Amino acid sequence: MDIYQEEIMEHYRHPQNHGTVENADIEQSERNSSCGDELTFSFKLKDGKVADVQFRGDGCAISQASASMLTEEVMGKSIEEVMKITKEDILDLLGIELGPARLKCALLSLQGVTHALADQKK
């Protein structure tokens, strides 16, 4: 197993920021209808930045690891910075090639985070 696969499995087994933010400002749920993966993100914002973010959900190693990695990535960033995160950034975090079905799993977290924060940007 290469180092990237090991890191994905580590995030899957021991996810970072797993849970629910108390008194969250935003909560957003997303579901991948093709495989059933589900993620719910909760956010606490302060001065236009992500002060805290947590996630919970069920799904494959890719969707759960992606959510864990992404929550680490967005912590402390401004909403504008978070909204600039791309599909390529998620793939860089994961560090592995993905087929179309697995790509949907990997991008579920980005979909949840951007949908949650899109309304705050306005």
Image (spheres, helix red, strand yellow):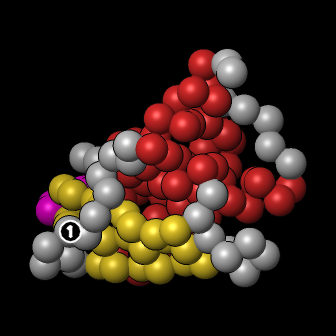
Task: Quadrant for residue 54, please give it.
Answer: bottom left
Secondary structure at badge 1 equals: loop
Kindly identify the residue that appears in the image at 62 percent across and 70 percent down.
37
Callout 1, which amino acid? Val
Q: Is residue 102 magenta?
A: no
Tell me, yes or no, if residue 117 can be seen here: no
Tell me, yes or no, if residue 1 can be seen here: yes
User: Viewed as shown, does residue 84 lie left or right of 76?
Assistant: right
Instruction: Tell me residue 97's x, y (percent).
Output: 79, 35
User: Viewed as shown, does residue 27 lie left or right of 35?
Assistant: left
User: Viewed as shown, does residue 55 lie left or right of 90?
Assistant: left
Q: The magenta stretch spans which residues?
A: 46-50
Task: Quadrant for residue 119, please give it.
Answer: bottom left
Seen from the viewer's position, the closer of residues 72 and 119 is 72
Instruction: Tell me residue 41's x, y (percent).
Output: 38, 70
Kindly identify the residue that appears in the image at 38 percent across and 43 percent down.
14
Instruction: Tell me residue 7's x, y (percent).
Output: 52, 29
Is residue 104 shown above or below 26? above
Is residue 102 shown above or below 23? above
Kindly identify the residue that appears in the image at 86 percent across and 48 percent down.
99
Instruction: Tell me residue 23's x, y (percent).
Output: 13, 78
Seen from the viewer's position, the closer of residues 40 and 112 is 40
Kindly identify the residue that appears in the image at 69 percent across and 21 percent down.
1
User: Viewed as shown, does residue 9 lie left or right of 11?
Assistant: right
**What main secondary structure does the magenta stretch of the protein show?**
strand
Q: Which residue is mark 1?
A: 21
